[in-house]
Image (cartoon, coloured by chain):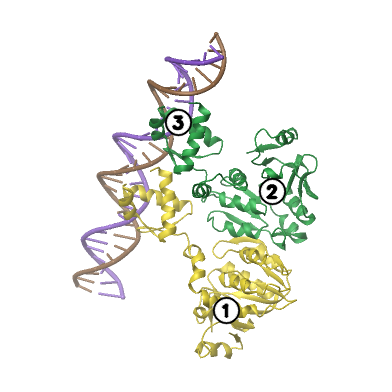
Chain colours: A green, B yellow, C brown, D purple
DNA sequence: ATTGCTTCACGTTCTTGCGCGTTGTGGTCT
DNA sequence: AGACCACAACGCGCAAGAACGTGAAGCAAT
């Protein structure tokens, strides 16, 4: 049994059972608990599971429920959201953009996260109310029907008081030369204003958005700390991004 | 059973039963009450439940049953909401408060209403996106978990630019002498700030709220244009309201 | 010989159940 | 009604045992 093969098996078991117990696995696979623990440690470092005393649990109960219930692989947005959720740590202040991926991100956040989340999306704010220990700050303004987020001069102004550690940005295209793009000029301006208020900007972009370009540029690639995506590791687009100094998280 | 997994189980049980009893759980899970108490203490420290003598309860009863609360007095709320929806006419600008009655109001609005709606509730704003011809303006600020609306200094300030024809206000009590009341001081201040920005304030109050009083006064009855309610026409409380110059819409 | 993976040994950390003194609750007595 | 008391629940400290991480040693393949 190859090491990598064994780790895949562990993940499959985790999806099936909803938990892993180090001792049981050692007996079952005929290995020492040390080796199992080492695997679990590595998988936890890769963000694929949550290490707990005695074994491991899925990264987030919410995400686990979805995969167990459906019995299927997570959908593209959920994979990206689950990975991006790991960027939010206790004590941090994060700006969260609008859109369905951002909503999936909120659902993937651990229930006991103690963080401050700033958003201009009423939908995201409403979903965050379910997280009792997350401090929510809503940015107001004229709400754009197209994407259901607050935009415009008032919203840009309201954003100016925010100072965040990171900005989780949703776009419709990530292109090597056009940079990050979206379909509406006001929306692009709003996203740009938010990016200025955060130390690091991370882009949430499921596979179909990589290499695509929309009419309005939000930011050039240079101003992005990283892209969270689910494209295959060997995709040539990834290399193009890395060559521009953009970290790729998957 | 993993320790961390047990805490997830406790939270699930809490959501299902609405309470946790330490002794029962110890017997059921086959461990000492001490361990259960330890778990409950930790979860309480994480803000995920409220520790009480003998076990635990949801963090805030109000938050916990906000979703089910919609189902209880449903038809009552819907009647009030349907009547209040008639106050919004094409071309008007209305401020809409938060809460389940306000949400019912949005759902009761005609699909083709051409109005401007200002709200400090992300939930109301999200629901309004379904109305293509309604212009939405969101008031931002710190989102208060208890009622899921933006409150505080920033929100009051953001409200100052609004000039509306009417304000549809939700409260928890409508009392002849205490006036309009609600359960939180910040919330009361926010509602007061909104009332100042509208020419007429109408209160949405289903029957059980008439005659009730909560800790904090929002406005005296004199500053209200009308109360939308579903109490019986012969209810003595109605006459008390009318004697104070308040129109009763039903 | 080197590399990669595993196992073993050991000191550390975590969880758990028990004893103890304290605090909260409900019922009883004056 | 207020004082009192019995009992359950509580928090804390402690000790036993399980689980843990680390570094050294073993082992197979190259």
Neighbor class of circle 2 (other Cα within 10 Å; few <14, some 14-19, many 20+) is many
Provide residue B233's location: percent of width, then percent of height.
53, 89
Neighbor class of circle 1 (other Cα within 10 Å; few <14, some 14-19, many 20+) is many
Cα gap from disc 3 to disc 1, whole angstroms: 61 Å
Residue at 45% in and 28% down = A35
Q: Mark 2 points at which residue?
A: A169
User: SS at mark 1?
Assistant: helix
* Residues marked 3 and 1, same chain: no
Up/down of B250 relative to A68, above or below: below
Provide residue B161's location: percent of width, then percent of height.
74, 68
Q: Name the residue under label 3.
A: A36
User: SS at mark 2?
Assistant: strand
Name the residue nearer the viewer: B239 or B83: B83
Provide residue A79's location: percent of width, then percent of height.
60, 44
Q: Are discs 3 and 1 less than 8 Å apart at CB?
A: no
Instruction: Give the label on residue A206, or none.
Output: none
Residue B86 position by quadrant: bottom right
Residue A225 seen in this snapshot: yes
- Left or right of A193? Residue A50 is left
Q: Name the residue under label 1.
A: B80
Residue A200 seen in this snapshot: no
Up/down of A143 relative to A238, above or below: below
User: SS at mark 3?
Assistant: helix
Name the residue nearer the viewer: A83 or B193: A83
**Marks 3 and 2, the one that precedes in the sequence:** 3
Cα gap from disc 3 to disc 2, whole angstroms: 37 Å
Residue at 64% in and 50% down = A101
Residue at 52% in and 35% down = A43
Q: Are discs 3 and 2 less than 8 Å apart at CB?
A: no
């Amino acid at each position: 049994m190859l090491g990598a093969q064994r780790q895949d098996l562990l993940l499959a078991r985790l999806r099936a059972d909803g938990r892993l117990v180090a001792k049981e696995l050692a007996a079952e696979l005929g290995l020492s608990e040390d080796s199992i623990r080492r695997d679990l440690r590595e998988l936890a470092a890769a963000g694929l599971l949550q290490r707990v005393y005695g074994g491991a649990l899925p990264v987030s109960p919410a995400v686990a429920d979805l995969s167990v219930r459906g019995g299927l692989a997570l959908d593209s947005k959920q994979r990206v959201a689950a990975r991006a959720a790991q960027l939010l740590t206790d004590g941090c202040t994060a700006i969260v953009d609008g859109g369905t991926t951002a909503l999936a991100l909120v659902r993937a956040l651990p229930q006991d996260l103690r963080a401050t989340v700033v958003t201009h999306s009423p939908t995201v704010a409403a979903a965050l109310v379910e997280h009792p220990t997350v401090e929510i700050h809503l940015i107001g303004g004229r709400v754009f029907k197209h994407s259901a987020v607050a935009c415009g001069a008032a919203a840009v102004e309201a954003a100016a008081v925010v100072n965040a550690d990171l900005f989780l940005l949703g776009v419709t295209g990530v292109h090597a030369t056009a940079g990050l793009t979206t379909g509406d000029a006001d929306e692009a301006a709003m996203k740009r204003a938010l990016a200025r208020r955060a130390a690091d900007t991370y882009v949430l972009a499921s596979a179909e958005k990589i290499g695509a370009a929309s009419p309005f540029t939000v930011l050039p690639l240079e101003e992005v700390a990283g892209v969270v995506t689910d494209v295959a590791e060997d995709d040539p687009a990834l290399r193009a991004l890395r060559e521009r100094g953009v970290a790729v998280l998957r």
